[in-house]
Amino acid sequence: SGLRKFLIKLKSFPVVMVIASNSNINYIQKMLGSLSITKFFDGIITPNKLVKPKPNPDMFNIIAKKYSVKNEDCLVIEDSLPGIIATKKAGMFSVGLTTTLAPSDLHMADIISKNYIELYSKLSFAQSIN
């Protein structure tokens, strides 16, 4: 809930937004297109012969390196336990989004949010434009 509004607000900051998913790239592109949100993302990374799937942190480490961002400066929004585990292994801040799982299933996340509107209100850097 509130995904588009969340993305619009985030893009008002100098942030890089990349999708790291275990899903098929064609499926991700189709979903982004159907939601008309492709333009908000700077890239997509999925597992391949050289990049292991979550819970391995490869995807997150590659993104941080590609965009010259320190791992500890990254915020990852995840809706799966393997994703949270990968985030923690990469040394990144994790948000468990309970759109598909119960909060107890995402207990390893740094914070848990039920939707994007609630998440935006929890992000301290975002408070300056509310």
Image (cartoon, rainbow, N blue to C red):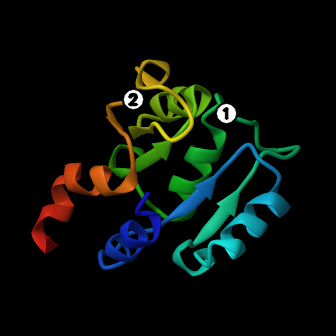
Q: Quadrant of the C terminus?
A: bottom left
Provide residue 119's location: percent of width, then percent of height.
31, 50
**In percent of the image, x 74 and y 36: which residue is there?**
53
Where on the picture, by quarter, is residue 33? bottom right
Q: Amino acid at mark 1?
A: Lys
C-alpha span from label 1 to label 2: 15 Å
* Residue named by callout 2: 109
Provide residue 42's location: percent of width, then percent of height.
57, 73
Provide residue 50's location: percent of width, then percent of height.
82, 44
Q: Earlier in the sequence, mark 1 or mark 2?
A: 1
**In percent of the image, x 81 and y 59: which residue is there?**
27
Where on the picture, by quarter, is residue 129? bottom left
Q: Is residue 92 left or right of residue 51?
A: left
Q: Is 107 rendered above or below residue 37? A: above
Badge nearest the viewer, 1 or 2: 2
Q: Amino acid at mark 2?
A: Ala
Q: Is label 2 in a helix, a strand or a loop?
A: loop
Residue nearest the observer in this picture, 65 or 57: 57
Q: Is 27 rendered above or below residue 61? A: below
Residue 16: give its label: none
Give the residue furthest to the front.
Answer: 1
* Residue named by callout 1: 54
Q: Is 61 rendered above or below residue 35? A: above
**In percent of the image, x 32 and y 73: which residue is there?**
9
Q: Is residue 12 left or right of residue 79?
A: left
Q: Is residue 51 left or right of residue 63?
A: right
Q: Which class describes the residues within 10 Å of circle 2: few (<14), some (14-19), or many (20+)?
A: many
Tag 1 and tag 2, C-beta contact below 8 Å: no
